[in-house]
Image (cartoon, rainbow, N blue to C red):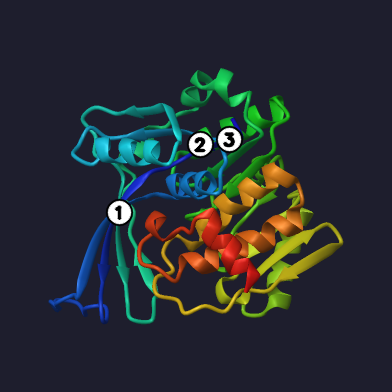
Amino acid sequence: MDIAVIGSNMVDLISYIDKMPKEGETLEAPDFKIGCGGKGANQAVAAAKMGSKVMMVTKIGDDLFADKTMENLESYGIDTEFTSKVHGTSSGVAPIFVDRESRNRILIIKGANQYLLPEDVDSAAEKLKKCSLIVLQLEIPHQTIYRAIEFGNEHRIPVILNPAPASKDLDFDYVGKCDYFIPNESELELLTGMPVESKEQIVAAAFTLIDKGVKNVIVTMGNRGVMWVMKEKFYSIDSYKVDAIDTTGAGDAFIGCFAHFLVQHGDVLHALKLATAFAALSVTKQGTQSSYPSVEELEQFMKI
């Protein structure tokens, strides 16, 4: 097994709108789609589409969405041995609103995801030990995340933590034990309380996390690219210019692709460049997982 994603799954309820309604206003929206999402599942699918062998440790509800979620993960070849149902609970759902400028607003209802507990990490221990990388996000309980980080450290397995959705309650004693910490600009701003208007400000904010013991801070900046900050140095990776249709799930696309190439080759800078291209391609189509490119599409894009 290459990658273990310990995290969330959601059902995306995507409304494509011309504009957000005002309070008390009802508007007609031109389109609607239902898709499988959730930050953990998105990242797992992105890595699997690139060819990684991926397992998920996650929880689903016992509603009409549950079997569809399981079938979707398995359709990408993801190992679902430790994907289990929580009876009497809904699956996680994410109502998403995407406007004409491809800007999105997202609500999440965690549902069964909030029942993914530290003991679930321990239950999957024997298979987790065989993985080369652990990938985490914040749509599950923090205690579960901390246990997964400890597990990675105990067994010398590198850990990626994506602090999304961002939380000021995040314990940086644990964050410092991760190998890669990957926030976007708004998450970096919330976690540091510092401005992120310019690349210089982003670097300054990231360095405060390095001072707290974080080894590698990788900041995704949308159409401004990616910033990789380490102790005493940083790299800037430019974005690829594309016509964006829907940016939903682009950050997860980036992380899943980065995880794949990190495991395959170990070249961080090269993995960041490929992940930036993968994320750029993802915004040229509607949806989350359904927008993620194939290996062939990524290779063709990189030739341009």
Q: Residue 146, which numbered label?
A: 3
User: How far apart in space, not on screen, are marks 1 and 2 (Cα)?
Assistant: 20 Å
x, y percent for residue 218: 67, 59
- The 10 Å Cα crowd at callout 1, few under 14, some 14 to 19, many 20 or more, is some
Residue with the mark numbered 2: 6
Question: In the picture shown, does residue 62 fall above or below 97?
Answer: above
x, y percent for residue 49: 50, 48
User: Which mark is nearer the camera, 1 or 2?
Assistant: 1
> Splitting the image into 4 quarters, where does residue 298 fall?
bottom right
Q: Name the element at disc 1.
A: strand
Mark 1 vs 2: CB contact within 8 A: no
Q: Name the element at disc 3.
A: helix
Q: Residue 35, which numbered label?
A: 1
User: How far apart in space, not on screen, are marks 3 and 2 (Cα)?
Assistant: 11 Å
x, y percent for residue 41: 43, 45
Q: Residue at x 30, y 28 (%)?
A: 85
Which of the two residues, 262 or 189, is positioned nearer the viewer here?
A: 262
Left or right: 229 as drawn, with respect to 286 = right
